[in-house]
Amino acid sequence: MARVSKIAAWSAGSIVLLIAILVAVLAAFDWNRVKPWINNRVSEATGRPFAINGDLSLTWHAPEGETGWRAWIPWPRLNARDVVFGNPEWAKHAQMAEAEQVTVSISPLPLLQKRIAIASLALDAPRVALERQKDGRNNWTFQSDSEKKSEWTLDVQQLVLNKGTLQLEDAIKRANLKADIDTLGQGNGDYRIGWRVGGTLNGEQVTGNGRAGAVLSLQKKHTDFPIDADLRVGKTAVSVSGILTDPRNLAALDLKLKVSGVSMAHLYPLTGVVLPETRPFSTEGRLIGKPGAAGGDWTYEKFSGKMGGSDLRGSLRYQAREPRPLLEGTVVSNYLSFVDLAPLIGADSAKSREERGVKTVQPENKVLPVEKFKTDRWTSIDTDVQFTGNKIVRKEELPINNLVTRVKLDDGVLSLAPLKFGVAGGSLVSTIRLDGKSNPVKAEMKLSARHLKLKDLFPTLDVMRTSLGEINGDAALTASGDSPAALLGASTGEIRAVINQGTISKFVLEAMGLNIGSVVVTQLFGDKQVQLNCAVADFEVKKGVMQSRAFVVDTEDATIYVNGNINLEQEKLALTVLPESKGVRLISLRAPLYVNGPFKKPDVEVDKGVLAAKAGSAIALGALAPVAAALLPLVNVGPGEKSECGTLLAQFSEKPAVTAGKNQNNTSGK
């Protein structure tokens, strides 16, 4: 046993002695002699010129985090000065990366498994220039000259940066950014690195600053890496603070995220997520990244904020998938201002468009929004978001009670199905589909208005409080166009509406914003309150021209027949208003009215001809009989066929067909 013990002791001592001799030899060795070999091997492996232009030295240090016999094996630390790493020939800059000093600490045992385990990579004064051209070529993708795959693998576990610069020039993202990195002094807690960034992104000025931990762990899980940053892109501000717990795949983020800007649409260059044009907004919530999700799975959890005068809250989830990523979730507003919805269709004021940096393209003589749809972004992502507005208010106190819609974007096709408003004790339900892959956009819309109470529609008008009337209507349109105005100007379909038992006056119509209607009523009745028995309207729409098939207003004093068309493309009216008096006391009802001209400033002209007035009661009534059947369903959802409207529709077929009026020869509105 003594002999065996002696042999073991001598063997162990010999091994230790050999290791000591080897360490001493390696430490004394002039490593500058192997620089050409290292330069050639790295250049061959990456397909780029690599060079260590300064001294190369080797020192030894105690292993980090090892126990048992492994703790007795020292780790080599290579120190190289003036290191450069080249670019491909097409690149703008000669070098992709430079550093005054590179320090590499290597764990030796993994070398036996052909794995280069770099425990720590420290870069002093690094200068990195990243480039990508429009054709997709970039300088951070390496291509070896050797076709044979290397048996060696590289594993970088920690990265330490000390005062340097990082520059990015990306032709695809239209980015030209430069970040300056510096070491922070005492008094910054766990933060050891500070940085400032500047440049441009998609033509917008970029500024920002932030702090981070000293050591970025690229190997160990659950190693907290603190982040605190503020970034401004144009008029959009982003603030994040929190920890990165799995830096290797950026899938374990837990951050407090604040975002604010003049429009949510401006977030696209930063996130790649298609959002609508909005009024100025701000949100704050928790951004969580879930480990194990290939390509990223992020949740903006329980966020809250403001959009214009409206509040917002909810949760959204972003999933990277093929062929397109998906954004899904729910958004709720307990107080939704009606004016905050206008930017979604380009109908907001010129001041609002100026705030969100959108050039005012709305002509002064146009009413319908002409701002074009941005369909080029619609195929970049799919969305499925449920939006609920629990209470909607507007300055004029229009009682839109709530809003519910499901916004879906699927392979470039945008749909709101349904888009439902609670209005004046009734409902306004529509389905809208816009095909953004078609040029121009193809659109389909169906709308149904049911049981809109007149007294609730205008709660601030005392004259409406005793009104029992309600509105029912339907519309179905298809069109192609690149803006809301273009769609309506090319639309084809039908529009029908019925109003039963209400009141009408110039005052009421002005409150509704129907200025042309108030002028017509003033011409017919003066400025007094008139009992409305029934009003029915049926329009056929062809290529943007609404042609009246039936348009009759029955009051206690007269029955008024309207014939003609409304040109949505040119925004012009060409209508003949012919009253039939129910009493000789209304002398003003003897003459027809002609309504012509643009929506904004139409002309109302009184026909002086006596013969035209006598023929007024029978204007175009030959066309009313076939459309009466189509209007009856709207009557049945209300008071029924025994109402004034049911009686009026039943009488249509008894009226004679006579053509009269100045506008009968101008049905195109052009």
Image (tube, rainbow, N blue to C red):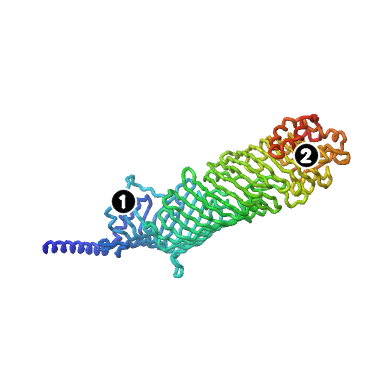
Question: Disc 2 marks which amino acid?
Answer: Val
Q: Residue furthest front?
A: 642
Residue 584 shown left or right of residue 329 in the figure: right
Which type of secondary structure does the marked residue at label 1 adopt? loop
Residue 214, quarter of the rendered image: bottom left
Question: Disc 1 marks which amino acid?
Answer: Trp
Which type of secondary structure does the marked residue at label 2 adopt? strand
Identify the image quadrant of the C terminus: top right
The circle on residue 330 is none
Q: Residue furthest bottom?
A: 186
Residue 169 position, x and y percent, is 49, 53
Residue 387 position, x and y percent, is 58, 49
- The crowd level at tag 2 (other Cα within 10 Å; few <14, some 14-19, many 20+) is many
Residue 339 shown left or right of residue 29 in the figure: right
Identify the image quadrant of the N terminus: bottom left
Residue 523 position, x and y percent, is 83, 43
The circle on residue 152 is 1
The circle on residue 553 is 2
- The crowd level at tag 1 (other Cα within 10 Å; few <14, some 14-19, many 20+) is few
- Marks 2 and 1, how far apart in space? 88 Å
The residue at 80%/33% (across/down) is 619
Residue 299 shown left or right of residue 655 in the figure: left
| 629 up-or-down from 401: above or below | above
In the image shown, does 387 or 489 lie closer to the viewer?
387
The residue at 71%/45% (across/down) is 453
Is any atom of residue 669 visible in this view? no
Residue 352, quarter of the rendered image: bottom right
Residue 172 shown left or right of residue 47 in the figure: right
Residue 518 position, x and y percent, is 79, 46
Q: How many marks?
A: 2
Q: In this rendering, which labeled residue sits more in front, label 2 or label 1?
A: 2
The residue at 84%/33% (across/down) is 615
